[in-house]
Structures are given as structure tokens and as C-alpha cells.
Amino acid sequence: MVRSALLYSFVLSVASLAFGSPLEKRAEGLTVELSTSSSSISSIEDLKVVATVTNTGTEPVRLLKYGTVLDDKLPTKSFVVSKDGKAVPFTGIKALFFVSISLSDVDDSAFANVEPGQSVSATHSLAALYDFASVGTGSFTFTSLANFVKVDDTGRYFEGGRGYSRVADVTSNTLTIKITADVAKRELQPLGKRASVSCASTSLSAFISASYTEAKALASGGISYINSRGASDLLYRAYWGSNPTSLVISVLNGVVNENSTSRT
């Protein structure tokens, strides 16, 4: 009898370690709720998806917005859109998040601070980000990509797993929207020129400005080299292959003559 009771107690202990108590709240966790004003629309021009992210954990979290449903500014991929079980092609900008990003130099707009039990929302216009025209009208399902990055006081660089940690416990619903008529392809609005230097570090700001000046000088030197050597030059072919010199020179001229009047 005692042996049976001990065995039963041991099994319960192992089960509690494996599955956790249903009354025990996780220290870290997020839920994503996708919603829309209408489940049936006639045009993708009216396609708006609201993503509400709730902190279900017990601790405040500081989330990097880039590449998630919290980023409603950059045209990056934060949803999987499908029709009849097949993915709708993404036509936005594919973000290369393995590139180093100095978390100490970006401003607060790059982050979302979410207290336990609190929520933050972002509204997405998706008409130009997916090729709806290639699959036609019908019912589409939208699922958020659970790629949230939590940044703490020790986080400094967004690089190869260093300085940040991914939020592992993320749940999300799936949203279905029917589009009945207009699915014609939309074009992305061009992003503004990145002509201004905004950097909290004086040394890094000086380095960026010097690099800008050097780039213009190198482009000018490249034009002179091409004009004197031509397309048959071995070095030219190594860099630009069979591209005509007129095309390469026009690109380099764009660098040399860059002088945006909209700089701040």
C-alpha cells in the first residue's frame, strides 16, 4: 500500500515537471490576435489586418519590432498568407536579419515595451506585399510569424544569436478573409532616401559621414577607369561581367551626384 502511494506520488511529480501546473503562469509568453473589420471584401485595397500582441507572462518584455507583426512601417514579411493550402507569394522586402544592427543606436520607435497583461497593436495594409493576382479571388488565411525577439539590458547587437533571445512561447490565431473581386497587383510605395546620418555615437557618425564621402570618390574613380579601359578590361569583366559600360557608369554617376534636397 505504501509502495503504491509512493509510486503514485512519483508519477505525479514527474508529470508536473513535464507539463507544469495549469494554475502556474509562465514567466514569459505572448499571444497574437489577428482581426479585421470585415471578413469579406471586394478589393485588396481594403485589406487591413490588425495584430494585437499581449504579454501573457509575469515579467515586462521589450520587443524588437523589426520583422514582426508589430512593425507596420517597413514592408517586411510578418504574415504567412495562403489560399487553398498554398502560400501566396510575398512581394515585399526580404529583410536580412543576420546583418548586424546596433540595438544601442536605434531609437525607442524600434521597440515595444509590454507590461504583463498589457497589449500593443499594429494595423497592416497588405495589398502590395503579396501577389494576390497570381492566385485569384477567394478565401485567404492569415497567420502571424512568431519571430519575436526580446531585448534586455545586456542586449547590444542583433547578430547571430548574441545580445538577444527569442520568445519561445508564442500562440496565435488564424484569420480568414474572403476577397471577391479586385486582386490586381499593387506596387510598393518607394521608401524615402536614407540620406541623413542619425547616430548616437559621435565616432560612428563621423565614420558614416567619411564613408559617404569616400564612396562618392570611389565611384568617380570607377567612372574614370571604365572610360579609359572599356568593357574588354579584365578587371571590368571580373566586377561587372557582360553588363554594358553605359549601365555601370549610370549607376556610379548616381552615387557621385547624390545630393538629396530632402536631407535632414
Image (tube, grey):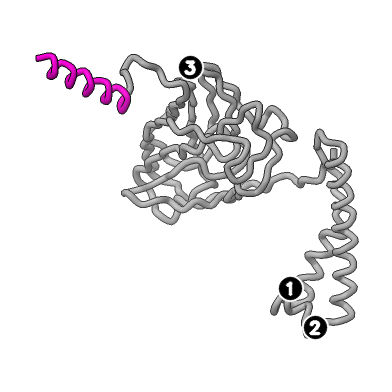
Where 26 sits versus 41, above or below?
above
Q: Helix or strand or loop: what does disc 3 sit on?
A: loop
Q: Which mark is residue 233?
A: 2
Query: Mark on residue 239?
Result: 1
Q: Earlier in the sequence, mark 1 or mark 2?
A: 2
Mark 2 or mark 3, whichever is nearer to me: 3
Instruction: Please tell me whether residue 218 belongs to the stretch shown in magenta.
Output: no
Mark 1 crowdedness (10 Å alpha carbons): few <14, some 14-19, many ≥20: few
Q: Secondary structure at mark 1?
A: helix
Q: Residue shown at 41%/37% (left/top)?
A: 41
Q: Is residue 40 left or right of residue 53?
A: left
For the point 37% across and 31% down, which residue is it? Answer: 173
Q: Residue at x 27, y 21 (%)?
A: 13
Q: Which residues are magenta?
A: 1-19
Check disc 1 and give the amino acid type.
Tyr
Q: Residues within 10 Å of mark 2 (few under 14, many from 20)?
A: few
Q: From the image, tell me which residue sits under label 3.
A: 58
Q: Nearer the viewer, residue 67 or 164?
A: 164
Residue 168 image position (x, y, % from top left): 45, 33
Residue type at the position of mark 2: Asp
